[in-house]
Amino acid sequence: MLELKTQGEAVVLPVRAQPGGRRNAIRGVQQGMLKVSVTQVAEKGKANHALAEVLCRQLRLRKSQIELVAGETAPQKRFLVRGITAADLSARIAAVLPENERGR
């Protein structure tokens, strides 16, 4: 189960990054974190930028709503998502999860 935490008027989204993947996609949930793969390699922040783009595109967020707050050089990252409730973010994530990951 995904562990979303409310922080003020924002939500902390834990992400497990998989840089250098075959495609940009939200892959599922692993150990309470959203598993996201990107084709970019982990070099000079390129993968972090690609992660933010994938999250914005697939979760219908504006770039100004999302900010990397922890894990810049680690596979486990935390993004701060502003202007959305935890329930709404959870629903958007559930809608884009692969069929076999829904309901976990």
Image (cartoon, rainbow, N blue to C red):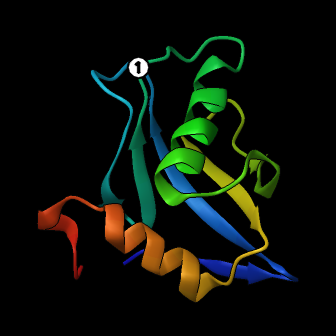
Which of these two is toward me, 12 or 59? Answer: 59
- Residue at the image point whose x is 85% and y is 81% from the top: 9
The N terminus appears in which quarter of the rendering? bottom left
88 over 53 or under it: above or below? below
Q: Is residue 31 left or right of residue 50?
A: left
Q: Residue furthest bottom?
A: 87
Q: In this figure, which residue is indicated by the disc labeled 1?
A: 39
Image quarter for residue 4?
Answer: bottom right
Q: Residue furthest right?
A: 8
Q: Position of residue 29 (x, y in %)?
A: 34, 62
**How many numbered discs sit on the rendered protein?**
1
Image quarter for residue 102?
Answer: bottom left
Which of these two is toward me, 9 or 30? Answer: 9
Q: Is residue 74 left or right of residue 29?
A: right
Q: Position of residue 77 (x, y in %)?
A: 62, 48
Which of these two is toward me, 30 or 80? Answer: 80
Q: Is residue 52 left or right of residue 20?
A: right
Amino acid type, residue under disc 1 in the picture: Thr
53 over 90 or under it: above or below? above
- Residue at the image point whose x is 42% and y is 44% from the top: 36
- Residue at the image point whose x is 56% and y is 75% from the top: 89
Q: Position of residue 17 (x, y in %)?
A: 48, 39
Element marked by disc 1: loop
22 over 100 or under it: above or below? above
64 over 30 or under it: above or below? above
- Residue at the image point whose x is 73% and y is 64% from the top: 81
The C terminus appears in which quarter of the rendering? bottom left
Q: Residue furthest left?
A: 100
Image quarter for residue 97?
Answer: bottom left
Is disc 1 surrounded by few (<14), some (14 to 19) or many (20+) residues within 10 Å?
some
Q: Position of residue 69 (x, y in %)?
A: 80, 51
